[in-house]
Amino acid sequence: MAKRALYFEVSKQIQNSIMRGEWESGQKLPSIIELAARFSVSKAVMREACSLLVGTGVLELRHGDGTYVKTLTLDTIMPPIQAALLLGASDLYSLLEVGLWLERGVVSVAAARRTERQVRDLAEALFVMEADDEQYASIVLAEREFHGVVFEASNNLIAVNLLRTLYPSLSSALELFADDNEVRELIVTVHQAMYGSIAAHNAEAAERQVVMYRHALQERVLEYRAQASHPSKQ
């Protein structure tokens, strides 16, 4: 348990460094040995932390070359999302629906079980969302971090592992809304409310907020699909 908590904390420190701009998109990270020395952990812990960030889409492992900060640009993300919308918007809609099914139960448990440390971690992620409102990639990473803490607070390892599998796709879905100021405001506003509910152990309110958040994104996906199908009407 202690080992798991350590690599999770180290992964958050690396992610925070990326969000502060210490390492930029496309930049190669130092070696595992150098990173381990910097964060005062073993090489095994550092490998696990980097593997977690690779799994969640923050880092990219290039075999024989090293580990890089994953580049999140509209040029690389928008074309496949637009294709997905045109060829099968139901898949993206269903993905958000699965996220809703999973999260509405988890957030209720998390509100009851969360620790004070986890409340502080939620506050840190929320601060990034609020402070970096002009850097959408940072908002998406902070949103992922926020939900990672929520799942961790459930004290259910299976739920945490499900999140690791699902959330890279959910984050990619959010990239669709990079130029949508209303969605940016929605992300910040909902997570402010969710933070208050979890901090206050208000499971019912936290669940309502997750439902509203996912439903709003689902509706936006349908709107974007209609626009992509009829570009002349945009």
Image: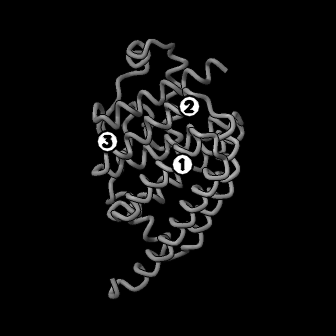
The location of residue 31, given as percent across then percent down, is 38, 22
In primary-sequence order, the first of circles 3 and 2 is 3
Quarter-of-image position of residue 208:
bottom right
Q: Which residue is labeled 1 in the image?
A: 194
Q: Amino acid at mark 3?
A: Ser
Image: 59 above or below 217:
above
Viewer-side label of 3, 2: 2
Q: Amino acid at mark 1?
A: Met
Tag 3 near tag 2, CB within 8 Å: no
Name the mark on residue 25: 3
Q: Which residue is labeled 2 in the image?
A: 118
**Residue at the image position 44 percent from the left and 12 percent from the top:** 40
Q: CA distance from mark 3 to mark 2?
A: 28 Å
Tag 3 near tag 1, CB within 8 Å: no
Q: Amino acid at mark 2?
A: Gln
Q: Secondary structure at mark 2?
A: helix
**Residue at the image position 62 percent from the left and 24 percent from the top:** 4
